[in-house]
Amino acid sequence: MKVVDEINSIGILGGGQLGMFLCLAAKRFKKKISVYSESRQCSAEKFCDHFFYGSFQDLKKIEKFCDSVDMVTVETENIPIKTLNLIDKKNKLRPIASSIEIAQNRIKEKKFLNSLQNIQTTPYYKIENYDELKEAFNKFNKNIIIKSCTFGYDGKNQHKISSKNIGNFKNLSIKNYIAEKVVNFKKEISVIISRDTKGEIQIYPPVENIHKKGILISSHFPSKLSKKTQKKAIDYAIHITKRLKIIGVLAVEMFILENEEIYINELAPRPHNSGHWTLDCCNYNQFDNLILAISGLKIHNPEIFSGAIMKNILGNEYNNIKEISQKYKFYDYFKESVKPKRKMGHFTKLKKLI
């Protein structure tokens, strides 16, 4: 099936805050926007033109949704591959299903990254049972973290393993997990790349990220990387973006080691939390360039006019938003309920570029 000549309507799979910001970007470029969500009350529902509620497994509803728009994108990579393939066969999915499939599974992601020249990841070991967990534990000098291969965002399904707690996993199901060697890194960074249908690339430079228990707490731009390390990080991100044939945006999370080596940690073929600073510091933010890219339009080189600290507001901090919003630009995600570790919004503190 041929892609329509002019893309006027866009569908988003997922209705969270990333979908909400995509809706706002789509309005800027006069695009009609539809959202398909597994939650009736979601961040994007108030900002779209048409809302579809249903399971990502319901292929009949998905097909109806797909047929109602010119192009579909995702705000989460955790979509069943059969659903992605259905849309891809209609030539209506950007980025393509194969690139999303790699990013939604840690083993596939590691294998892909390690197949690329000069790209490294943390050493890893696939585990299916307790004996393999012990084997990985000993192989990596009793210093590992285990993560589920799928659905492991924001620190979910991740456990630091030690001699004291390894026995706790003897009777637990750890099938389809990955064990990663814990590496000593000095910084966590991310680079966001936008790529359009003509292969043109635009770059959002590296930001330094602070995590706590697997949850992003804050992102800091500009980073304090050396020029050499910054260039290497950007080059890696561009190379990965090209190899995945991304149309849209790709966020590449990395570890910077003490010796300035770079390990690629995770990929996200969608807008990323660490790119929210672009909403206030760029003439074309990450959501704008994604909408342009999937619409078959030329993406723009983002003019960056401010530095920033982006801080996530979790549920346990949500009571302070009145005070926060008086000081900084605050974005509310309009979540249906407040939970302690749930991202309820973020604020941006601008700072001068030096």
Image: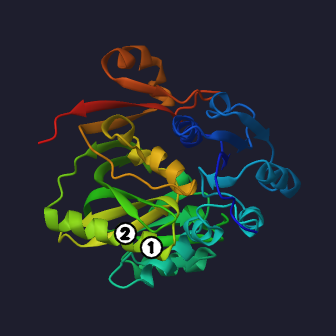
Badge 1 amino acid: Lys
When the figure is inspected, residue 68 is found, relative to residue 157, above or below; the finding is above
Q: Residue at x 44, y 51 (%)?
A: 214
- For this view, does 280 lie left or right of residue 89? left
Q: Residue at x 74, y 62 (%)?
A: 87
**Label 1 belongs to which residue?**
242
Badge 2 amino acid: Ile
Q: Nearer the viewer, residue 233 or 259?
A: 233
**Dot 1: element:** helix
Label for residue 238? 2
Residue 218: image location, x then y, percent: 34, 41
Residue 85: image location, x then y, percent: 73, 68
Do the CB atoms of the residues marked 1 and 2 lie less than 8 Å apart?
yes
Label for residue 160? none
Location of residue 133 (image quadrant): bottom right
When the figure is inspected, residue 193 is found, relative to residue 242, above or below; the finding is above
